[in-house]
Image (cartoon, rainbow, N blue to C red):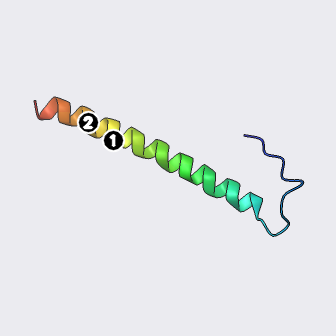
Amino acid sequence: MSVDTSKGHPAMDYAQHKATYAGFIRGSQISIVLLVILLAGMAVFLT
């Protein structure tokens, strides 16, 4: 994702914002994969 930060507020730490967003996306992806594995395991072992 490309964001033009050249006209942004000077007090904003855009690099940190991008790092936080990337971490959130990565955590969301890991959570989704783990939930799919959990649901697949429940479907196999509980039915």
Q: CA distance from mark 1 to mark 2?
A: 6 Å
The residue carrying mark 1 is 35
Which residue lies at the image location 62% right of the left edge and 52% below the top edge? 21
* Contact? badges 1 and 2 (CB < 8 Å): yes
Q: Residue furthest bottom?
A: 11
Q: Amino acid at mark 2?
A: Leu
Counting from the top left corner in percent of width and height, residue 28 is at 48, 46
Side of 39 relative to 32 (left or right): left
Q: Secondary structure at mark 1?
A: helix
Q: Is residue 42 above or below residue 5?
A: above
Closer to us: 13 or 45: 13
Q: Residue furthest left?
A: 47
Q: Residue furthest right?
A: 6
Side of 35 relative to 4 (left or right): left
Side of 8 relative to 33 (left or right): right
Q: Residues within 10 Å of mark 2 (few under 14, many from 20)?
A: few
Q: Which mark is residue 39?
A: 2
Q: Secondary structure at mark 2?
A: helix
